[in-house]
Amino acid sequence: MDKEDILKLLAERHPLLSDNLKTIEDAASAIIDSYRHGGKLLICGNGGSSSDSEHFAAELMKSFENNRPIETKLSKKLKEISSVHGECLSRCLESGLPAISLSSHTSLTTAICNDSEADLIFAQQVIGYGKAGDILIAISTSGNSQNVTDACITARALEMKVLGLTGADGGEMRAFCDILINVPETETANIQELHLPVIHAICRIVENHFFPHPKK
């Protein structure tokens, strides 16, 4: 499917998101541009949004719906380095789009909580991983999670672009997002139910741009 088909299907399956289509398209375009210039994604959220951040990263770091063969040059090097394992590696490995879920590092986040301030668990990782041209994807149903907001502020200071995924209000985070996808719900569970199709639509658009051949 091309971008237009993906967004059309999203609107058909989830009519409440119809007013968000342009912002979703803008978000996917920003991610594509970052990847084209050597950038990466940092993704964060709490609770269910933490799970969404891991889900988001997983869909990008390996094949989602399309074939992602590694480059021929890399395949050749793998076989040259190991005659035993290289063939399997060259056949089974897939090209990844770099994305890091900041919710996934238990030892690091607990160290930050213990040694510094709990609200800095994401901002500290943005300092360590982030650079100009990267994108922070900040997920918060309320838009008011302090640790997520602090990550947004830190990302902006590093000249990263901030993509927010929130509920209808947008919360405090709104002021620190370059692109805000605020889905039209106010209850946490309902917001989260709309965040997942948004994530899938973005991943489809991005994957189709770089790897346009669906699995058979």
Image: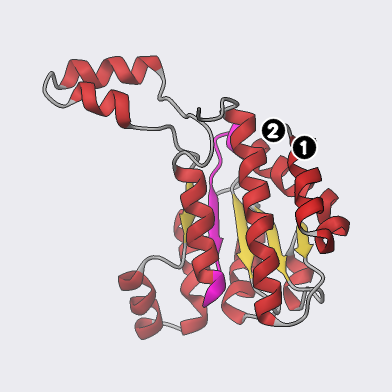
- Amino acid type for the residue under numbered disc 1: Asp
- Residue at 76 percent across and 78 percent down: it is 171
Residue at coordinates 33% horizontally, 32% vertically from top-left?
93
Using the image as rendered, state which of residue 106 and residue 58 is in the foreground.
Answer: 58
Disc 1 target residue: 5
As drawn, the label of residue 88 is: none
Element type at marker 2? loop
Q: Position of residue 38 (x, y in %)?
A: 54, 35
Gap in Å between the C-alphas at discs 2 and 1?
A: 6 Å
The residue indicated by pointer 2 is: 1
Q: In the displayed structure, would residue 12 be above or below residue 2?
A: below
* Mark 2 vs 1: CB contact within 8 A: yes
Quadrant (top left/top right/bottom left/bottom right) for the N terminus: top right
Magenta-span inclusion, residue 44: yes
Give the residue displayed 35% in from the left and 82% down from the top.
115
Q: Is residue 178 magenta?
A: no
Residue 12 percent coordinates (x, y): 81, 52
Q: Is residue 158 visible?
A: no
Q: How far from the left and from the top, in percent, is residue 48?
A: 54, 74
Q: Residue at x 82, y 51 (%)?
A: 21
Residue type indicated by callout 2: Met
The residue stretch that appears in magenta? 35-49
Assign a secondary structure to mark 1.
helix
Q: Quadrant of residue 156?
A: bottom right
Report the side of 8 relative to 113 (left or right): right
Check the image and tell me how it is coloured.
secondary structure
Q: In this orientation, does residue 193 appear?
A: yes
Q: Is residue 64 left or right of residue 146?
A: left
Q: Using residue 61 as the reference point, say whether residue 136 is left or right of it.
A: right
Q: Considering depth in this image, is 122 or 189 the residue closer to the camera?
A: 189
Give the crowd class for mark 2: few <14, some 14-19, many >=20 residues within 10 Å: few
Where is residue 64 drawn, in percent x and y?
Answer: 51, 42
